[in-house]
Image (cartoon, grey):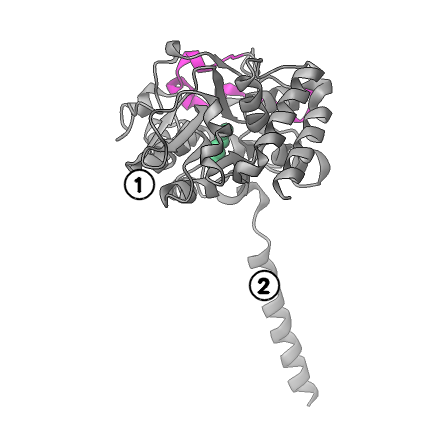
Amino acid sequence: MRKLMTLVLALLMIAGAAMGLAGCKDESKIVRVYNWGDYIDPDVTKDFEKETGYTVRYEMYETNEDLYTKLANSNASYDVIFPSDYMIERMVAEDMLAKIDMSHIENLKYIDKEFLSLGYDPNNEYSVPYMWGTLGILYNTKMVDGEIDSWSALWDEKYAGSIIMMYSQRDAIGAALKSLGYSLNSMDDQELQQAKDLLIEQSPLVLGYFMDETKDKMIAGEAALALVYAGDAVYCIDYNEDLTYIIPKEGSNIFYDAMCVPKNCKNMEGAEAFINFMCRPDIAARNADYIGYSSPSTAAREQMEDGNNPYAYPDLSKYKLEIFSTMGEKNKLYDVIWTEVLAKVGE
Ligand code: N2P
């Protein structure tokens, strides 16, 4: 009996050791990536794993503010994140990002110079451009009377229940500010108050505030108009030819999303390998073709099926476009306005 028990114990120990080995991967071979939803060709991460031997742990967020909150208020650690311009500016100011050794990003040479050293990272130390785009209105030409060219369409009572707003505070408040003729970066309390009132006034007309679900709803014809990023418009128009996209005449936002490394990353080498891979023209081309957003790499665009899509690559000189900058002291006011607006939509 004792012999049998010794054997069982020995077997248990071997099994335990094997499980331990399987459960505990070499940390230096793991790259933790935190990206927006629907913002990559999933096969690209698989190819990265095959080519480099790294394992990608991939998680997604919906907005810049969700990303910020996760990083600022939890112990979560990621190696690569994808904030937009104004959020990069805020994270640099709050010492949340690590400098990237750009000499390790060999494929940075394929990124067009005009996308480097922009205002949010003037010395090009913290960010590597990923995608860019504009904010505008996607609408269904069969559900809307005539052509639309103004933000006011999102406040038109004719379309009550058929208007989708974006679940993103800067974009929603930005659309309201622009339709009032103000800057997207207004720090004026009264202007911000008016923008809030305008969103509250609009709330009975709104089908909902959505992010990635907007695409399915617009493709299915469930709403007539939606506040979207151009990349999502490109994706939807591909599936439903009744849809079209405009940048309103009052002006709008142009955004730049880039790859960054949080200060508490655990694998800088893996982060650099991932970022470098994403800049390789064939990989950048596959990503941009898959998601519909605009690539900052001419070398990638030359390899794309949709590298000259008119909605993704408009003549920018025709539009009044502003880049978001961080709000500093006014970030709290934005949060308050946002909570009040969302509470009204739920009513
Ligand atoms: C993709 C979101 C893209 C982010 N679902 C635009 N800044």
Q: Residues within 10 Å of mark 1 (few under 14, many from 20)?
A: some
Disc 2 element: helix
- Residue contact between numbered discs 1 and 2, judged by CB atoms under 8 Å: no
Q: Amino acid at mark 2?
A: Met
Does residue 209 sit above or below 303 in this rendering?
Answer: below
Magenta residue check for 96: yes
| Residue 92 makes an appearance in the image | no
Query: Which tag is nearer the camera, tag 1 or tag 2?
Result: 1
Residue depicted at x 53% and y 15%:
124
Residue located beneath label 1 in the image: 239
Disc 1 element: helix
Can you give x and y, in whole percent of width and height, for residue 6 in the image?
Answer: 67, 80
Q: Amino acid at mark 1?
A: Tyr
Residue located beneath label 2 in the image: 19
Q: Residue furthest top?
A: 317
Residue depicted at x 58% and y 29%:
261
| Residue stretch in magenta | 92-118
